[in-house]
């Protein structure tokens, strides 16, 4: 309930004029309906403070509904069979394949190589905290035909793969595509990326998703919003992801549903109502 009230207040703060218009429109329609009803049915008595209170309450509820921030939207890509969903939630609770951005070293060690605050780190803690060698084995098998360069680093792995390299990892019957999204400094281990690398990484991710999805949904986080130092706002990152999905889908279908899952901490930064309005009829 508290979260719902916060969402409503956020909607009013962002769209006060729209809230006012919705209230006036609803109240005007109710007033017109009552006036016409009394005119044609003289025996119908609608008068006194109670009908007025009801009209005001209904108008306020309509205003709330009209401007409340959405937690989920979906829209179809024009002339395609693919639907894009954008929602706030936990990506690990979604059905289908889940994409996890990682560094070009495909690290499996928590600490400096992989921050426990990143999605990659949460993935490691959730599924491989006590069994990192099991993940290493799957990654090595997946990347056995990929070219790499060796770099001596202060900590972690020394095999550096190309940006966009992918590894399909299976955990308890669920599938995850780890894709190389960032570079890492050999000394500080700090991750970094840019828009060009992001676009390249996403292109390779969609190529792998085409081969692995088999019609199941593909889930993607708000790539670039974490420790990769991309320097873009959440809204700009989301627009880039949506543009990437549309561009790749129109070139060749990926799957029927592609879902972009945003962490709840981004709720005040992204208004999904505006996002849907922007991309409607893409």
Image: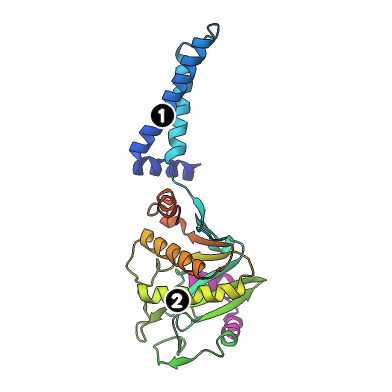
On screen, 191 above or below 45?
below
Q: What element carries label 2?
A: helix
Magenta span dominant secondary structure: helix
Q: Does 124 lie within the magenta span?
A: yes
Residue 193 visible (yes or no): no
Identify the residue at horizontal 47%, vertical 32% (top origin): 61
Q: Name the residue under label 1.
A: 25
- In the rendered image, the residue lying farthest to the front is 79
User: Where is residue 126 shown, x and y percent of the image?
Assistant: 57, 69
Q: Which of 75 and 78 is in front in this view?
A: 78
In the figure, residue 17 lies in which quadrant? top left
Q: Mark 2 points at which residue?
A: 201
Identify the residue at horizontal 60%, vertical 75% (top origin): 211
Residue 76 visible (yes or no): yes
Q: Which numbered disc, 2 or 1, marks the residue that appears first in the sequence?
A: 1
In the figure, residue 125 lies in which quadrant? bottom right
Q: Which of 227 and 83 is in front in this view?
A: 83
The reply, left or right, for residue 156 in relation to residue 173 is left
User: Where is residue 179 shown, x and y percent of the image?
Assistant: 50, 77
Which label number is shown at residue 133?
none
In the figure, residue 156 lies in which quadrant? bottom left
Q: Which of 173 and 59 is in front in this view?
A: 59
In the picture, which quadrant includes the C terminus?
bottom left
Q: What stretch is highlighted in magenta?
A: 119-139
Q: What element carries label 1?
A: helix
On screen, 193 above or below 77?
below
Q: Which of 44 and 61 is in front in this view?
A: 44
User: Where is residue 210 shown, x and y percent of the image?
Assistant: 57, 73
């Amino acid at each position: 309930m508290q979260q719902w009230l916060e969402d409503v207040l956020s909607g009013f703060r962002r769209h006060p004029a729209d809230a006012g218009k919705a209230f006036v429109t609803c109240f005007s329609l109710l007033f017109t309906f009552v006036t016409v009803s009394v005119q044609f049915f003289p025996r119908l008595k609608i008068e006194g403070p109670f009908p007025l209170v009801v009209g005001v309450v209904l108008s306020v509820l309509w205003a709330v509904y009209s401007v409340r921030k959405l937690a989920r939207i979906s829209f179809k890509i024009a002339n395609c069979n693919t639907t894009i969903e954008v929602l706030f939630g936990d990506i690990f609770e979604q059905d289908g394949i889940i994409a996890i951005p990682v560094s070009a070293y495909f690290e499996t060690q928590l600490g400096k190589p992989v921050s426990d605050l990143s999605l990659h780190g949460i993935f490691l803690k959730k599924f491989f905290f006590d069994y990192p060698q099991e993940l290493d084995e799957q990654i090595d098998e997946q990347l056995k035909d990929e070219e790499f360069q060796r770099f001596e680093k202060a900590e972690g792995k020394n095999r550096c793969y190309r940006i966009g390299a992918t590894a399909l990892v299976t955990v308890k019957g669920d599938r995850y595509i780890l894709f190389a999204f960032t570079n890492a400094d050999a000394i500080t281990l700090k991750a970094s990326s840019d828009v060009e690398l992001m676009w390249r990484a996403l292109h390779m991710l969609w190529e792998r998703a085409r081969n692995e999805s088999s019609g199941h949904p593909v889930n993607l986080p708000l790539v670039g919003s974490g420790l990769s130092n991309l320097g873009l706002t959440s809204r700009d990152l989301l627009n880039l992801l949506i543009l990437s999905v549309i561009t790749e889908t129109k070139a060749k279908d990926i799957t029927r549903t592609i879902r972009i899952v945003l962490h709840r901490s981004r709720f005040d930064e992204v208004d999904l109502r505006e996002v849907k309005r922007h991309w409607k009829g893409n």
